[in-house]
Image (spheres, rainbow, N blue to C red):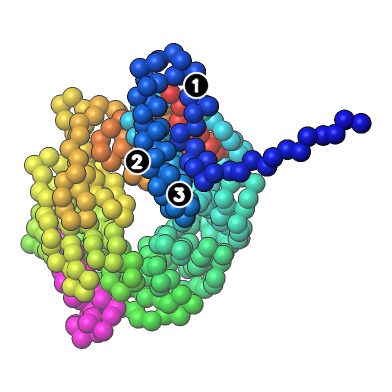
Amino acid sequence: MRKKKKRTPIKMEPEYFDDEFDLADKKDDLEDNPEKGRSGKKRVSKRKRRLSSMSYEERIAAHKRMVLLRILCGIGAAALIVILVCVVRNLIAYSSYKVINTEDRTAGTSVQYAEFYGKTLRYSKDGATFYQNKKKIIWNETYEMESPLLDICGRNMVIAERNGMKVCLFNLEGKTTEFEVTMPIKKVQISEQGTLVLLMEKNGEHFLQYYDGEGEMIAEGKAVFEKSGYPVDISLSDDGLKLAVSYLLVEDGITKSNVVFYSFASIGAAEIDNIVSEKKYDNTVIPTVYYADSKTAFAFGDHQLTVFKGSQRPEVLQEIRTEQEIQSIFYDEAYAGMVFKEDNGYRMEIYDTEGNKILDKAFDFQYEHIKISKDRIIMYNDKEWCIYTIGGRLKLKPCELSGPVSDIVALSKDRFLLVKANKTETVKMKL
């Protein structure tokens, strides 16, 4: 038998850890470009001399640095791609949409939808369902109300019976408590802490009641309404400590409005009727007040927007007056918007919580409804809808609807829920 030759083990030199200068991989390139080959040989020779002067530990450290550098370059390249994709998507103006899910329901059933903590809430006179998607229901709770009133703040939600006496409190896990009051409910507001305020009316008199998250009444009042006028709107701050109320009254034949701030904290307890500040308007109606957060409140008039600031005693920060009558308003936790009629269409202005104007945009879409959700301005009528960004860019060109909608709910920046008479459609924007 032929003896096998004993193979000599190959000793891997430390320089092989640095694969940047693998001469075998560069052979073809050197043959095609001799000049490059000569300069490349000089660089390799210089590199080899430098490596030969290093200790084994230094070579290992150099290799690790090279590997780390390559990893960082890869991460940087991936991040750059993500940024570019986001920029391109943000600049795209969609022209249509596709239906990705349809949910049928009994015709004529009064069902409404809202966003609750980033997910979808469906509620009606029979109960409420909170769900992630069609196949994943988080909770389903029942109640009986002829006309439900909804308010949401953070992780808490209240549904009360309009002109009735039933109140149901919910959080992300479901219903927490249910109780009844002794007078018909007109409006309801809830805070992030779960405290709530009810505006009620009985025999022409208005009452305000303040409850904790267990349904126990903390405070109530009536005289403040009798002295100030007819309560038009209320809004509770996120922290549950301040309440803004807009009153309407007529004195000497002059229509007046009064925006009053009440405090349920210790500072309010030391004041008459818990009033910590107020702002009076002559010849003006203030139909809407809205607490954007615990320090900022918006008051919308027919010719003005007032921004109030203050954690204890809200005061006027900015008062934006307009010559034109306000046609529509829209708002959320960060922005307040107004729409004005122009000769060739409409114009909208948007302000932040500091009263700074961030958008002045003309448009000609014949809208019937306008709202803001997830930094998208949604406009629609019975036949079409369109979407703008907060920056004023057209995100969805006027697009035909397959049928009238009662509401459009933003699920994300490119997915929406179209609420129709007998079904709901989850749709996604497309080019």
- Of callouts 1 and 2, the N-terminal one: 1
The answer to whether residue 40 shows anywhere in this view is yes
Disc count in the image?
3
Q: Residue at x 68, y 42 (%)?
A: 9
Q: Position of residue 223 (x, y in %)?
A: 25, 77
Q: Residue at x 56, y 41 (%)?
A: 108
Question: In the image, which residues are magenta?
Answer: 254-278
Indicate the secondary structure of the residue bearing disc 1. Answer: helix
Q: Residue at x 44, y 53 (%)?
A: 55
- Mark 1: few, some, or many residues within 10 Å (few <14, many ≥20)? few
Q: Residue at x 28, y 41 (%)?
A: 390
Amino acid type, mark 3: Arg
From the viewer's side, name the closer residue of 389 and 24. Answer: 24
Q: Position of residue 68 (x, y in %)?
A: 44, 48
Left or right: residue 259 versus residue 11 is left
Give the CA separation, mark 1 to mark 3.
24 Å
**Which numbered mark, 3 or 2, is in the foreground of this view?**
3
Residue extending furthest bottom?
270
The residue where tag 3 is placed is: 59
Q: Which mark is residue 27?
A: 1
